[in-house]
Image (spheres, rainbow, N blue to C red):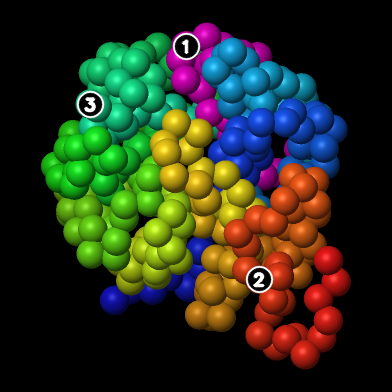
Amino acid sequence: MIRPKSVRVVEVAPRDGFQMEKSFIPTETKVQIINSLLKCGFKKIEATSFISPKAIPQMKDAADVIAAVDRSTGAKIAALVPNPKGAENAARAGVDEMVTFVSATESHNQSNVNRSIDESLKGFATVLDIATSSKIEVATGIAVAFGCPFEGDVAPERVERIVDSVLGLGVSAITLGDTTGMATPRIVQTTCEHLLQKFGELNLSLHFHNTRGIGLVNVYAALQLGLATFESSVAGLGGCPFATGATGNVCTEDMVYMLHEMGMETGIDLDGLITVSRNVERIIGRTLPGQIMKSGKRDNLSKPVCR
């Protein structure tokens, strides 16, 4: 059991959360939310996706969002790029990091991007070339790393093969995604232990969904291995638009609350983050899954919660 003293929390709602919304969120509103999150102390935010507007209309203003976000905090502003064209657009917009993605199973990769895993990996090489020429870092997210809705359990060796391939291309960081909420503490620890043994000092982050109600339990399980970077979404917004029932990322403020109560540092202003989450819920216009924004922290339960 090696619990980290500090944890890096990466906010992904502006991309992973907003992409689920059918009604277009005005660019200025997106920017206002991102900037308010930056004021809370986040050091990395996944701000948007340079994907075809035909695929996800919500992301059609990606370049405008990047142009308007406050860069004075020094935080890393990342964006998802699905292909070389997206990489070119992201480089032109001036992102700090491009995020490529591939699934751990052939069935999910075909369903998600209509390509084989090898075809996706081949495309990454071109993205890396574009990013390198612009001195931009590249990270890779591996979807369904802990379980696939089409193929069931995913052997750690299958994830290992993809990690080995992308590291060989020059990717700087890896995120394992629990795309449809199939992770359990046992699976998380088995997969992560396998990768850490194979790759040693792996720059690894984890992205859990709360589909089956154990997202934070999986975070806790990963903490026991010393893993200290987690992606999450303010107010629990979002999920996967192409996976039935897979709504709800792990909620950022709920996770930060848990980490702080465990004595771990995040550098994030939790009170400010709760205010942001309530604002996000107001903007979205429906009740969102976050709990701390409803109940408040345990030391102010006797105080009225202003919504």
**Type of amino acid at the residue the image marks with label 3:** Glu
Of helix, strand and loop, which one carries label 2?
Answer: helix
Residue 176 part of the magenta-drawn span: no
- In the image, 159 versus 306, the foreground residue is 306
**Does residue 172 appear left or right of residue 285 in this picture?**
left
Q: x, y percentage for residue 207?
A: 44, 49
* Label 2: few (<14), some (14–19) or many (≥20) C-alpha neighbours in 10 Å: many
Q: For this view, does 152 lie left or right of residue 224?
A: left
Which of disc 2 and disc 3 is earlier in sequence? 3
Q: CA distance from mark 3 to mark 2?
A: 38 Å
Q: Which mark is residue 292?
A: 2
Q: How many marks?
A: 3
Q: Residue at x 77, y 59 (%)?
A: 278
Q: Which residues are magenta?
A: 71-94
Residue behind mark 3: 106
Query: Considering the numbered disc 1 on the image, is that residue within a helix, a strand or a loop?
Result: helix
- The image shows residue 30 at horizontal and vertical percentages of 77, 37
Question: Crowdedness of circle 3 by 10 Å Cα count: few (<14), some, many (20+)?
Answer: some
Residue 64, visible in the rendered structure: yes
Q: Secondary structure at mark 3?
A: helix
Foreground residue among 217 and 260: 217
Give amino acid for label 2.
Ile
Q: CA distance from mark 3 to mark 1?
A: 21 Å
Q: Which residue is under mark 1?
A: 84
First in sequence: mark 1 vs mark 2? 1
Query: Can you tell which of label 3 and label 1 is closer to the viewer?
Result: 3
Which residue corresponds to the image point at 29% horizontal and 61% vertical from the top-left?
A: 184
Q: How far apart are the alpha carbons under marks 1 and 2? A: 40 Å
